[in-house]
Amino acid sequence: MATLKILNYELAPSPATIFGCLLPAPWLGMLTGLLLAFGPSAGFPDRFAPLTLALTHCLVLGMLAPIMIGAVFQLMPVVAGQNVAGARFIAPFVALASALIAAALSAGFLLGQSRGFIFALGLAGALYGGVALALARTGWRVKVIDATTRTLRWIALALALVVGLGIALAGRFAGWWQIDVARWLDLHVAWGVVGWIATLIIGVASTTVPMFWQTVRPSPRWQRSLPGIMWLPLFLASLQILWQAALLCSCMIVATFSVLALRELGLAKRRFDPAWSLWLACAASWLLAALLTAVWSLFGKRLPAPVAPMIPWWIGVLALVGGGVLPVNAMLGKIVPFLVFMHLRRQIPARCRVPAMQAVLPPQRLQWQARLALLALALLLLLPLAPALFAVLAGLTFAAAQGLMGVLLILTLLRYRRELLNLACASKQAKT
């Protein structure tokens, strides 16, 4: 049995700190879907097409980054017992600055404007550099007891490497210096997708999935291996001679964790929960992405012409949408209502009734959002077969799924404010 963790909700940050990171993100996801549906399609869906690069950075920076940073700000005190120094000052700028960085990079890719890369370079260095420093300072104080706390302790390293590699590439595109773009891009993608997104998701899920979906807690071997086993191949990949071996090793590790996750998710007690299917699709997506990456690495040059260009697109969609957006949607649908419930319980007197999580955000609404998100994933995977048609269908469906999530989160926040207002009115009437 893994060590049982005691969650310290008394140290949880203020609602404004976390909600400021989480609530705007789905709307950036919606804008990403609209960009896919109506953006310039020259060269699309080639992995180096301007629209593909713009969509990738809008999704990763505009949507995923604020949610993941907000989740770390929440989990550091609750799970690891350490408040992130400066989180309440950094949090209000995370979503807005991430959106501006994504917009600047999109302008650079789509319009060829070097000023976009220069603006993104400076703002990303200031924002994510500040976040990485705050997380690193806090991480040193974290007592490691399982996969989640170990991941939280070291996650600043992955963020710093991703940002540093991204800044190097942005400086190259801005004409400031010369680097081997292909080499640095491979490392940037590897650390961004596996080192940051996959590692943080699996580290956080090691606590949240057993908590909310009642699966068996991961084994001691699982708990001890993260995040080191995910990062070791990435460090080896910095040596050019070891790149392919490191890539295949990373694929094997991701595939192994995916298979284990699928097995445990299949035994979850709350399989009726709307978000359970999102976690199942997430694990399957990482497995398929790992297998396709291995195939591309070994046989990419020998694959038939109609299939070869599709594989990079499928890998990106499976990793970023299936492996990133779906679990983020699943966690938003659980964590935000839970935070509302927790803060209401702390602020409302014990004699007053606190609405349950299911009342704050009804599961029926989440069911529709989950279905739309899964449909968007399926349409995105079909896109290379008929780009002109499926770009519009997939983009609008993805925008609808994320827009619905944004609406649901706003309704949840309004419920929170209404309960506090009712409490204030009741207290005022009692005094009079």
Image (cartoon, helix red, strand yellow):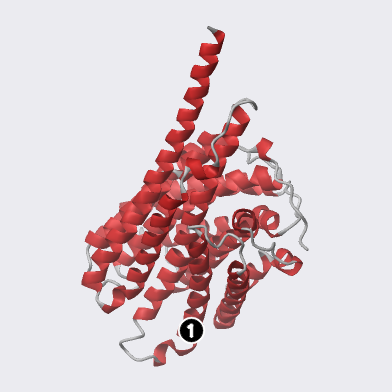
- Specify whether residue 112 is in view: no
- Residue 293: x and y in percent read 48, 79
Q: Secondary structure at mark 1?
A: helix
Question: Relative to the observer, which residue lies in front, 381 or 224?
Answer: 381
Q: Quadrant of residue 348?
A: top right
Q: Is residue 91 above or below residue 99?
A: above
- Residue 28: x and y in percent read 36, 50
Q: Would residue 147 be found to the left or right of residue 158 on screen?
A: right
Q: Residue at x 26, y 70 (%)?
A: 390
Q: Quadrant of residue 36?
A: bottom left
Which residue, given by chain and number where applicable, does mark 1 sit on? 297
- Residue 118: x and y in percent read 37, 52
Label 1: how many residues lie within 10 Å, few (<14), some (14-19) or many (20+)?
some
Q: What's under tag 1, amino acid-wise?
A: Ser
Q: Residue at x 70, y 41 (%)?
A: 8
Tell me the quarter of the image containing the N terminus: bottom right
